[in-house]
Amino acid sequence: MANPDRLSGIAAFVEAAEAGNFSMAAERMHLSRSAVAKSVARLEQRLGTRLFHRSTRSQHLTAEGTLFYQRCLRVLAELEQAEAALAQGQLALKGRLRLSMPGLLGRTLIAPLLFALAEQHPGLQWELSLTDRRVDLIEEGFDLAIRSGDLPDNHDYQTRPLGQQHMVLCASPAYLAQRGRPDTPAALTQFDCLIYGRAQQTASWRFEAGATPAQRVDVPARLCLDDLGALLDATLAGLGIARLPLWLVRADLDSGRLLPVLGDSLSVGYPLQLLWPAARQITQRLRLVIDTLAEQLPTRLAGLG
């Protein structure tokens, strides 16, 4: 981590060099003379060289101090130009970003937010991997991943929460008219359940209602699909009861194409999180993506955006 006194020491040094003595520099900086002198002394100690010749009557730059002063002027001038450009909106973000995210969630909710950023910042280059496979960020060189579900403790990564994927148990009106409705979570074992996953014969669905302790029900899979879009299609086709994210089925629930099942029992959702390698520096472009998703994605997850 950079020394927080580094810039203050340089500022005191430049003021002292231009003023000709520490007293005048202290007046310009609204500090005491001793504060300026100590700041310059710490700078000299860090650099390992003397910047000023000091005597009881005079103070002037050493040869090394003169060279360092000239370099400091160029650095400060560049800082001023950067501040001016930033104030005028001219400091463009540039570089490549590699992101991984779940397929349908990424395509439906996340990609539109990133497309808006791409339009605002034409200097950015994007590589988006939309897959439900959990990529290895470090081995595969990704800057950022969006992950659904609980994450194990791992000091190799940093995380930031994006909210909950609220899950809804639902079915088509035709299916419920034919088979009736389960009145408790346990009754789901007597119905056709549509499962998200790979090669599963059963799935464990978790429910909670108010102060009642959470309940897990192992439901048999009539149909198991590893694609949320296909799972939604099967539900709309009347093949059974599915557990789907609210953001995905909000429009179908509002239109009546799907109906909620067990409305008094909340199907527990999954946390959605951002994940990036802890050892990697958070660049300005990466910070932009992290902050944008953290600010805008929660409302979309709730089916409100």
Image (spheres, rainbow, N blue to C red):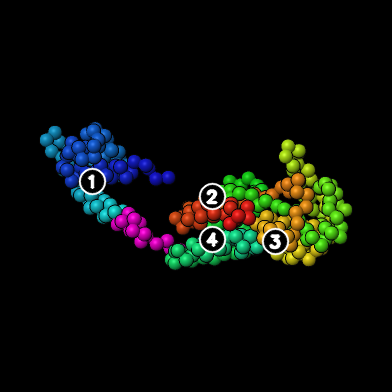
**298 sits to left or right of 51:** right
Question: Seen from this angle, which residue lies furthest front?
Answer: 255
231 is higher (above) or lower (below) than 164:
below
For the point 35% across and 56% down, the residue is: 86
For the point 74% across and 42% down, the residue is: 209
Disc 1 crowd rating (10 Å Cα; few below 14, some 14-19, many 20+) is many
**Residue type marked 3:** Ser
For the point 11% across and 35% down, the residue is: 57
Q: Nearer the viewer, mark 2 or mark 3?
A: 3
Quadrant of res 236: bottom right
Q: Position of residue 219 (x, y in %)?
A: 83, 52
Per the model, the C-alpha gap separating discs 4 and 2 is 24 Å
Q: Secondary structure at mark 1?
A: helix
Q: Position of residue 169 (x, y in %)?
A: 75, 53
**195 sits to left or right of 279:** right
53 is higher (above) or lower (below) than 301:
above
**Which residue, given by chain and number where applicable, does mark 1 sit on?**
14
Q: Which mark is residue 255?
A: 3
Badge 2 or badge 1: first in the primary sequence? 1
**Residue type marked 4:** Leu
